[in-house]
């Protein structure tokens, strides 16, 4: 894989290390069908005004993002930034233009508000690319101004929140405030559907300070999820196989709640205060041993835990025909 040599590129490469192209690709559809959508909600191809999104970045997309070397860090996500020669060099210098297109899809979705797009014509291939906005977390940067620290942190947190180490698409509800301090809108329908607390994500890819995640609830021994980078049963600092994201344990140990109590306001690691993104899930996206379905996050065995689930996956060495296997 071709990568830029700057510090930013290496860091962002690490973040999309699993984010975008890794084992499963960063925006590929998951094994199930997309959920039915109502006005303002989105599937994999876009992100809504109310924070609903579908993750699926694999763990290697941020590594070759190169925000500082592709002309965007200084010039912003404006026409001038996209027209910079360094951007075209970066876009055409990665493993594939499809990969670069995927990275930009998530960057623009996190940065621009819903209803806005950025369109760019590749001077090498003549192909036109269009990326839709969604969350609007970095509006100053999208208008061509140099990226602020608040925007750096929120863009980093947003990209990390969309990581899925299995390359599986799972709908999530992203909550928090944009760089101007305005809360991401959450409809009553979204709040009711995405009722499961999941995780907090924060850090700064632009400065090389790293990416961090914390759990907002504890997984029971019988539970598992494809959202393992954030919703983990691991203790703080343990490996969740989502490099470069470091799991910090419970969000409550490093983060402070917003005055609304609806999401985390700030998180502190190594003496640095970060603006986080808080995520919620649908209950059905947290699997439980005993629900009659052998999920790929579960294993055969003789117990009732996710890694030894006889009720769903049978005893190891037993074929489905030997007993009733739902």
Image (tube, rainbow, N blue to C red):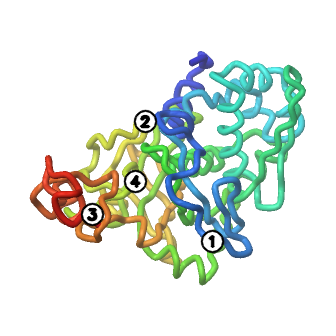
For the residues bearing labels 3 and 1, Cβ distance under 8 angstroms: no
The residue under the point 40% across, 36% down is 243
Task: Pick the residue in front: 299 or 25.
Answer: 299
Give the percent coordinates (x, y) of residue 123. Answer: 88, 23
Task: Pick the residue in front: 134 or 75.
Answer: 134
CA gap between label 4 and label 3 equals: 11 Å
**Mark before the other along the chain sequence, 2 or 4:** 4
Q: Find numbered disc 3 in the image and state the secondary structure of the residue it sits on.
A: strand
Q: Nearer the viewer, mark 2 or mark 3?
A: 3
CA gap between label 2 and label 3 equals: 24 Å
Q: Find numbered disc 1 in the image and state the secondary structure of the residue it sits on.
A: loop
**Mark before the other along the chain sequence, 3 or 1:** 1
Mark drawn on residue 223: 3
Left or right of residue 67: residue 207 = left
For the residues bearing labels 1 and 4, Cβ distance under 8 angstroms: no
Residue assigned mark 1: 36
Q: Quadrant of the N terminus?
A: top right
Residue 209 seen by the camera: no
Q: Is residue 262 above or below residue 114?
A: below
**Mark before the other along the chain sequence, 1 or 4:** 1
Determine the image quadrant of residue 246.
top left
Mark 1, Cα crowd under 10 Å, few <14 / some 14-19 / many 20+, is few
Give the percent coordinates (x, y) of residue 131. Answer: 78, 46
Residue assigned mark 2: 244
CA gap between label 1 and label 4 equals: 20 Å
Mark drawn on residue 226: 4
């Amino acid at each position: 894989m071709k990568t830029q040599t700057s510090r930013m590129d290496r860091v962002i490469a690490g973040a999309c290390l699993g984010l975008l192209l890794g084992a499963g690709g960063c925006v590929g559809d998951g094994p199930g069908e997309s959920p039915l959508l109502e006005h303002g909600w989105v599937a994999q191809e876009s992100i809504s005004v109310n924070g609903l999104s579908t993750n699926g970045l694999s763990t290697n997309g941020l590594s070759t993002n190169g925000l500082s070397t592709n002309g965007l860090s200084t010039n912003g996500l404006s026409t001038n930034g996209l027209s910079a020669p360094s951007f075209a060099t970066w876009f055409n210098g990665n493993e594939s233009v499809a990969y670069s297109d995927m990275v930009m899809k998530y960057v623009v979705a996190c940065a621009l508000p819903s209803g806005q797009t950025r369109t760019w014509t590749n001077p090498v291939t003549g192909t036109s690319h269009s990326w839709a906005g969604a969350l609007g977390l970095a509006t100053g940067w999208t208008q061509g101004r140099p990226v602020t620290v608040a925007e750096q942190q929120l863009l980093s947190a947003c990209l990390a929140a969309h990581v899925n180490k299995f390359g599986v698409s799972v709908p999530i509800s992203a909550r928090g405030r944009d760089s101007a301090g305005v809360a991401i809108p959450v409809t009553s329908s979204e709040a009711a559907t995405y009722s499961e607390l999941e995780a907090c994500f924060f850090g700064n890819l632009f400065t090389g300070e790293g990416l961090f995640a914390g759990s907002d609830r504890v997984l029971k021994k019988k539970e598992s999820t494809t959202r393992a980078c954030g919703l983990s049963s691991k203790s703080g600092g343990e490996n969740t196989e989502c490099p470069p994201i470091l799991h910090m344990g419970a969000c409550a140990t490093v983060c402070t709640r917003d005055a609304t109590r609806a999401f985390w306001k700030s998180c502190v690691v190594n003496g640095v205060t970060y603006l986080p993104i808080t995520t919620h899930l649908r209950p059905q996206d947290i699997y439980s041993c005993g629900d009659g379905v052998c999920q790929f996050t579960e294993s055969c065995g003789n117990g009732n835990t996710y890694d030894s689930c006889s009720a769903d996956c049978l005893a190891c060495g037993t074929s489905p025909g030997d007993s009733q296997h739902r």
